Image (cartoon, grey):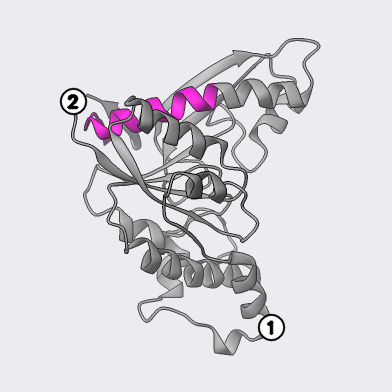
Amino acid sequence: MADKIKIGVLISGGGSNLQAIIDACEAGSIDGNIVFAGADNKEAKGLERAKKKNIPTFVVDYPAIIKSYKSDPGNADLPADFDFNEIAARQSLFHGAAGSEKVKIFITTRVIAEAKLIETMNQWPFDLLVLAGFMRNLTPYFIDRLNHVSGKPRIMNIHPALLPSFPGVDGYGDTFRYGCKVGGCTVHFIDYGEDSGPIIGQRAFPIERNDTLDMVKEKGLIEEWILYPECIQMFAEGRLEVISAEGRNIVKIN
């Protein structure tokens, strides 16, 4: 048995994947323990799932931070090591618009929130950070402060589509509306782009002619609850390594 890893989880909503990870840890199918569950808003119902298991919880209120910055940008609570130009040059979320006001607001408010996330999370040392329905893009500011070892990233995400198809916030909806006959979910490591990081694992399911979007989402969640614990366990076993091959980063499973 592998040594138990310490897992941090970030959520935005109901936390069904958080529950799947809690259950897998308790069942022993993940050699790990969840050491905290954080959210980006006060209304995230999934935090109650963690509280029931006596897992520490916290909220970094992104909506309040964004509202405060827009009302008084001159009084922004920016970290001392914030360098807008450096972060704008490294991110891959916006192309050809790095100097726009929209990008400035996005990066600045995200970094304010991310600095608070890092400060709070540091109360509980962790090996892996799992995004379980966390609906906020992360900037290079945050990513670089968590990924300390080359080839060993430690921020994992699950996406409701078979990447690289249908990145973004509505993977199942985009899959359904496109008329795909197969849907699925993907677990990947985070990089500087939107759902563009190296893929760890995927699971697929058929989309039948009479399926509704709600039915597709239900099928997808069942696969997510299987896939995410499997991928976390491979991390716990030290089997995941990111390597460069033909100009792109891929996950090598040892």
Give the quadrant of the N terminus.
top left
State the mark number for residue 71: 1
Q: Are marks 2 and 1 in contact (CB under 8 Å)?
A: no
Give the residue drawn at x 26%, y 41%. Answer: 5
Q: Amino acid at mark 1?
A: Ser
Image quarter of residue 175 = top right
Return the residue at label 2: 1
Question: Does the magenta segment cover residue 224?
Answer: yes
**Separation of disc 2 and disc 1 at Cα?**
53 Å
Q: Nearer the viewer, mark 2 or mark 1?
A: 2
Does residue 99 appear in this view? no
Question: Does the magenta segment cover residue 151?
Answer: no
Q: Is residue 208 left or right of residue 231?
A: right
Task: Give the mark, 2 or 1, whose residue is nearer the N terminus.
Answer: 2
Q: Mark 2 falls on what kind of element?
A: loop
Which of 20/141 is in front? 20
Give coordinates of residue 103: x percent, y percent: 59, 67
Give the residue drawn at x 55%, y 17%. Answer: 204
* Mark 2 closeness class: few <14, some 14–19, many ≥20 residues within 10 Å: few
Q: Amino acid at mark 2?
A: Met
Which of 68/57 is in front? 57
State the mark number for residue 135: none
Give the quadrant of the C terminus.
top left
Q: Which residues are magenta?
A: 223-246
Q: Mark 1 falls on what kind of element?
A: helix
Which of 199/27 is in front? 27
The residue sitting at the bottom extreme is: 74
Which of 3/241 is in front? 3
Does residue 107 appear in this view? yes
